[in-house]
Image (cartoon, rainbow, N blue to C red):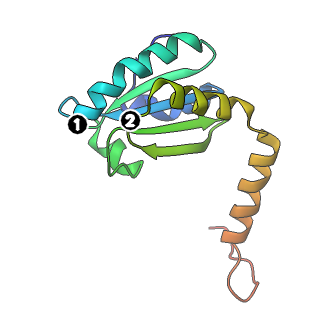
Amino acid sequence: MATVNITGEQFAATVEDNDIVLVDFWAEWCGPCKQFGPTYAAVSEKHPDVVFSKVDTEAEQQLAAEAGITSIPTLMAFREKVLVFSQPGALNAQQLEQVVDAVKALDMEEVHAHVARSQAEAATTQDGTQIPDL
């Protein structure tokens, strides 16, 4: 599958409607982004079961800010709507393949259980009382 450009309006639906989504946050003026682009596109062709998307941080500044992007390129990977990987910097083809393979190999029952525990802990105060849902 070729890479797809997504906007802020498409971001949530892309993550929600697909099992595995990789997102390359990039900009036209960014040298490392331009170097990473062909690698990202080439690896995308090998994994038709994964959505390889790109977000232009210049055109989508609000989305980049909401995603906490402070350096580009930044690669994020989502699996079953959960952010499972986020790393700034360009990767070579072997490194990108390793990320894709690792995301595919995740035990998602364990990941979802970890997320649930983290959310439960965040909802509990220091003295052990539950913070009410608002």
Could you tell whether 121 is left or right of 53 in the image?
Answer: right
Residue 22 drawn at (x, y percent): 52, 30
Image quarter of residue 85:
top right
Q: Earlier in the sequence, mark 1 or mark 2?
A: 1
Q: Position of residue 76 (x, y in %)?
A: 49, 39
Residue of label 2:
90
Identify the secondary structure beneath mark 2: loop
Circle 1 SS class: loop
Of the pair 21 and 129, the residue shown nearer to us: 21
**Number of the label disc, if any, that sits on residue 28:** none
The C terminus - image quarter: bottom right
- Residue 18 in percent (x, y) is at 62, 25
Q: Is residue 13 left or right of residue 4?
A: right
Q: Is residue 45 left or right of residue 115?
A: left
Q: Amino acid at mark 1?
A: Glu
- Left or right: 81 as drawn, with respect to 91: right
Residue 10 in which image quadrant: top left
- Name the residue located 58 percent from the left edge and 33 percent from the top edge: 99
Residue type highlighted by circle 2: Ala
Q: CA distance from mark 1 to mark 2?
A: 18 Å
Q: Report the residue marked by disc 1.
A: 58
Q: How many marks?
A: 2
Where 15 sits versus 39, above or below? Answer: below
Of residues 111 and 134, the one nearer the viewer is 111
- Furthest-left residue in this view: 29
Picture layout, residue 66 above or below residue 118: above
Q: Is residue 131 above or below residue 101?
A: below
